[in-house]
Amino acid sequence: MEFLVASAIGALTAGGIYLLLRLRTFPVILGISLLTYAVNVFLFASGRLTIGASPILIKGVETYADPLPQALVLTAIVISFGMTAVVVMIALGAFLGSSDDHVDDLPEEDPRAEDAK
């Protein structure tokens, strides 16, 4: 079970990093989302993976699921949703401003500079 969850976290992280390195805004947004999913699964798995255990400590029960990671994951989901909405709006504004969603820091070449050569 732990190997499966660790593999899923690794695959989500690898896919997220790959998409973050793309040169378009939409794959970057998807990469950020995949990384947040990986962090959520990691936080959830940090509370021990128990099946069929109660979420709180009850008298006479020796195995229970830790409720703190569950609360952290719920908070992280809300924060990641808000962050994704902000990033989508910034990307949409950049796209509407330049009619292109290509991400690059290279300065555009001035066509007048080529005529002077």
Image: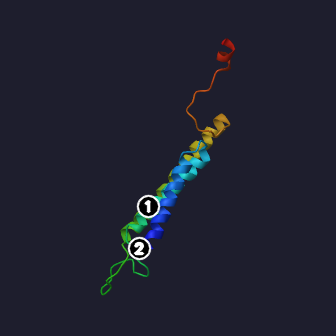
x%, y% of residue 46?
A: 38, 66
Q: Secondary structure at mark 1?
A: helix
Q: Residue at x 58, y 27 (%)?
A: 107
Which residue, as the protein is rendered here, is positioned at the far bottom?
Answer: 60
Identify the coloring. Answer: rainbow
Q: What amino acid is found at the position of numbered circle 1 in the picture? A: Thr
Marks counted in the figure total 2
The Cα–Cα distance between marks 1 and 2, rounded to whole angstroms, is 19 Å
Residue 81 seen anywhere in this rendered image of the structure = no
Q: Mark 2 highlights which residue?
A: 49
Comparing 20 with 96, the one in front is 20
Q: Quadrant of residue 64?
A: bottom left
26 vs 102: above or below: below
Q: Residue at x 69, y 14 (%)?
A: 115
Q: Residue at x 64, y 16 (%)?
A: 113
x%, y% of residue 7?
A: 48, 64
User: Mark 1 or mark 2: which comes first in sequence?
Assistant: 2
18 vs 66: above or below: above
Viewport quadrant of the C terminus: top right
x%, y% of residue 47?
A: 37, 69
Q: Secondary structure at mark 2?
A: loop
33 vs 56: above or below: above
Viewport quadrant of the N terminus: bottom left
Q: Mark 1 highlights which residue?
A: 75
Residue 115 seen anywhere in this rendered image of the structure = yes
x%, y% of residue 89?
A: 58, 45
Foreground label between 1 and 2: 2
| Residues at circles 1 and 2 in contact by the CB criterion of under 8 Å | no
- Circle number at residue 101: none
